[in-house]
Amino acid sequence: MTTFPLSRRRALAGAVLLAAALFVAGRYLAGAGASSGASGPAERPLEAVEAAAPAALVVHVVGAVRRPGLYRLRDGARVADAVARAGGATRRADVSLVNLAAPVADGVQVVVPRRAPAAASGSANAPQTPAGPLHLNTATLEQLDELPGVGPSTAQKILDFRQEHGAFTSIDELDAIPGIGPARLEQLREVAAP
């Protein structure tokens, strides 16, 4: 009779010890997994990964530069940085028409215009007739100023819009520029092209 209750006690004690051992092992494994996961590079929060990598801008540099094309720049870069990445301005560039201090934004096109040929300046009294439509994406401030109904202020707004939003894809985009209404837009359709 004494052996039966003794084995029951042993079984109960063994079960308690096993439960305690499993509890301790579970706590240990849970703590080890959490600490190793936090230190691994694959488990870092997304904010930490984004903060570690500097933001990159992609700009399209065209016109009178040595190597036109797409360039990656750091966040906070200026137009001067974009021109420098494209090999700098050529001798024919008219950098006085470009705001080199302007900040660049992702996806913009930086246009460095060429200087007008000396023969184009000619005599002030001679009427100049354009050989074809004026291309809005390469036109200088002076060329835009000569368009019908466009003065120096509106010409500068067109350049600013082009700098901020990139190349014109349609003449209709001029409607977004203050000072160009439907009537003026119709006039410009005849003499300008994107």
Image: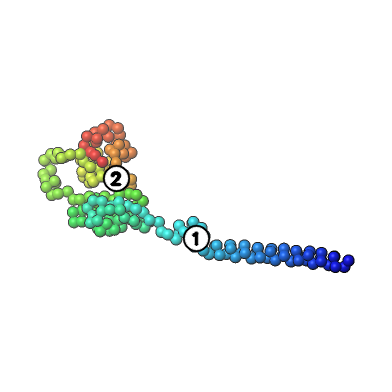
Between residue 72 and residue 142, name the one nearer to us: 72
Residue at the (51%, 58%) spot, across then down: 45
Residue at the (29%, 41%) spot, across then down: 169
Residue at the (11%, 44%) spot, across then down: 123
Q: Position of residue 133 (x, y in %)?
A: 20, 39
138 up-or-down from 44: above or below? above
- Crowding at dot 2, Cα within 10 Å, few <14 / some 14-19 / many 20+, comes out as some
Type of amino acid at the residue the image marks with label 1: Ala
Picture disc at residue 167: 2
- Crowding at dot 1, Cα within 10 Å, few <14 / some 14-19 / many 20+, comes out as few
Picture disc at residue 42: 1
SS at mark 1 in the image: helix
Give the Cα separation between the discs numbered 2 and 1: 40 Å
160 up-or-down from 86: above or below? above
Picture disc at residue 191: none
Q: Is residue 178 visible?
A: no
Type of amino acid at the residue the image marks with label 2: Ala
94 up-or-down from 133: above or below? below
Between residue 54 and residue 188, name the one nearer to us: 54
Residue at the (28%, 53%) spot, across then down: 69
**Left of 57 or right of it: where is 90?**
left
Q: How is the image coloured?
A: rainbow
